Amino acid sequence: MHSIPCNFSVFGYPVISSSMKEIKVKDASTLCTLLPDGEPHIQQSVFVGEEQRSSSISVKSTPELEKKYVHCVYDAIAPHFSSTRFAKWPKVSAFLESLPTGSLILDAGCGNGKYLGLNSSCYFIGCDISAPLIKICADKGHEVLVADAVNLPYRTNFGDAAISIAVLHHLSTENRRKKAIEELVRVIKKGGLVLITVWAVEQEDKSLLTKWTPLTEKYVEEWIGPGSPRVRGPSAFTLESIPETEENGLGGHTKDSRENTENMHQSMCLTPENKDDSLVSKDGSNQQEYFVPWHLPYHRAEVSGASAGALANGLAKKDDKKGAVVYNRYYHVFGEGELERLVSGMDNAVIIDKFYDKSNWCIILEKTLLGLKHLQDKDTSPSLI
Amino acid sequence: MRLLTHNMLSSNIKGVTNGFPLRIEVEKVVEKEVEINHDFLRNIFPKIDWKAFSDASRIMGYVELPEEAPEPSVLESDLEFLRKFHHALLELHLEEGALVCPETGRKFPVNKGIPNMLLHEDEV
């Protein structure tokens, strides 16, 4: 790891510390520029630490990385995205069907509302940060609102259960991911359950990894002088043309449900100890930050109108060969045990199940009375702590 | 937005100590029938802040709910009450209007039945 002093403003945040310090890499949302010539594959090495950020910036404040590469993208691709998201993941369905009749279920990050109403004996309320996706849910008759998963506008202890399906991997800092989990637990009653699923570092289809772009210092905001960071867009990448789209591939949400069943069987046999699956960058360190492409066909891009702006400011690129506008979605993929680590510090939730399924890490939490967790910890196996 | 949702929503603006209940400003109310589920009503009833719910229903134009919360035993057998509870809870929709933070006066818009509860940068 290089030690390079950093003292600059990234992503529009004010300079926090003027001292030259070597600080451990932590969060993708505070990438800093290094760009030594001729060393394109050096892992980013110096980041402004969480501790420094949190003093002046709320964990609830959305980093630019997420605004550009999560929010804007989903807003632009909403109808197309929704058209590809209809296969119900059996593990999620099973969880929802297992809940007691009459439960109030909260889906935070509900996307196109795929799971809303899945259990007809229960009542669902969905929220998502994307207004276009929420509009799609509302048009189907669901009860939904536009809200931020990191700051749910719900009273404490109200719901019976909550789900977060393929959401947390779009949050770019550990503190924001923790906060989102805390919110899921906060809004449900004691004894209530939370199901969380996230994309795994350990992908079953390793060929997909070749289509993702790891975040390296090539995509960073540059410091060119005091007080004036210049943003560099993805056009600065040497982005190889992407042979395959991600519309259906990842996380097991494929069109062919027969395929799903087979994938599920295979994943049950997969032992998490198989480290060969993990993503490793060229210099050997673990890579978890990625841009995953989305190909929006031209005819869809024209209808939505958002793409003209995205193309103009470099957030998207045209691929004439495929007749599509290519967007990048930011992902922090999770490593084995990472979800458990995020939860380990919580004093009002215990893990009651955890599993790997179709390239996703999944966890089920139960909200406990304060303090009860310490009693229950004695009974859990060491691997959970 | 149904009144069930309204009964759960709270202003989460930085610095607000009690953001519940949000005051409702009505521009358009719509009624949409939905099948009654007694189990659900009995499960939900203890969670409901009755005063907020009853006040909200009046603002939405429905005056049938008692101002005082009935005893839970009423839900076991009083079908008429269950019907009114169901109607106010799930069949009245605020289509257009706003939800107002009780402490700051900040308005969260409701358009096409969808509340937008996103905060501005300076509110987090």
Image (spheres, coloured by chain):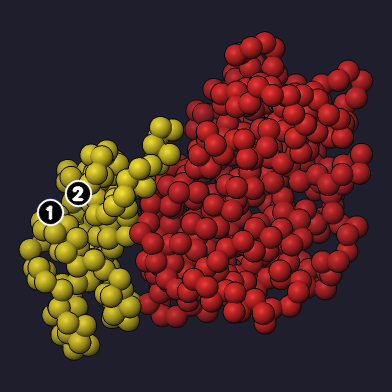
Chain colours: A red, B yellow
Task: Bin the neighbour count of mark 1 within 10 Å (Cα to Cα): few under 14, some 14-19, many 20 and up.
Answer: some
Percent x, y for residue A148? 46, 46
Percent x, y for residue A129? 47, 44
User: Nearest the camera: A80 or A231?
Assistant: A231
Q: Which mark is residue B24?
A: 2
Q: Which mark is residue A30?
A: none
| Residue B20 as seen in the image, left or right of residue A165 | left
Quadrant (top left, top right, bottom left, bottom right) of the N terminus of chain A: top right
Q: Residue A103, located in which quarter of the rendered image? A: bottom left
Looking at the image, can residue A79 be seen?
yes
Amino acid type of disc 1? Ile
In the structure shown, which secondary structural element does the residue marked by tag 1 occupy?
helix
**Which numbered disc flags the more N-terminal residue, 2 or 1?**
2
Estimate the spatial distance between the alpha carbons at disc 2 and disc 1, rounded to whole Å: 7 Å
**Residue on which the image places disc 1:** B59
Amino acid type of disc 2? Ile
